[in-house]
Amino acid sequence: MHWQKEMICGLSLYDEIDRKSIDNVKNDIMSEAKENQNHKNVELNAEYLSLKEAACFLKISISKMQKMSANRLLPVFKPTNGKVYFSKTDLLNYISAGRICSQQEITNSINFN
């Protein structure tokens, strides 16, 4: 009898959970698609990049880029009181700082010392 109460419109409780999971995946895909739209047609050849361009360059969301600059994880340039710019060199240095050595490099370093 308890099992019958879980059936709603021919769907079990588990089907409802699966439907919610599918809805979450759909929302994630839509968010990613919207973010990809934001990154379309952005010119990345300049030495200094706008917030949107820098986010596109790092392949992260604009809000993540804003948080990183607000937390001073990346240096910014503010030639005017409003708009911020990022040096492409600083962005490349930020990426390079996260480099993880390969096992071979670690082994070579140990054997060298």
Image (cartoon, rainbow, N blue to C red):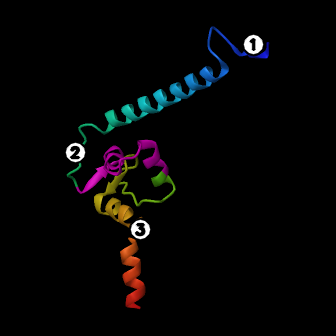
Is 8 on the left-hand or right-hand side of 5?
left
Prevailing secondary structure class for the magenta stretch in the rendered image: helix
Q: Which residues are magenta?
A: 47-67
Q: Nearer the viewer, mark 1 or mark 3?
A: 1
Question: What numbered label is drawn on residue 57?
Answer: none
Q: CA distance from mark 3 to mark 2?
A: 29 Å
Q: CA distance from mark 2 to mark 1?
A: 58 Å
Q: Residues within 10 Å of mark 3 (few under 14, many from 20)?
A: few
Q: Nearer the viewer, mark 2 or mark 1?
A: 1
Q: CA distance from mark 1 to mark 3?
A: 54 Å
What type is the residue that disc 2 sits on?
Glu
Instruction: Check disc 3 and report the residue beneath it.
Output: 100
The image quarter containing residue 37 is: top left
Residue 35 to residue 11: above or below: below
Q: Nearer the viewer, residue 5 or 75?
A: 5
Residue 25, position in %: x, y?
49, 30
Residue 62, position in %: x, y?
41, 43
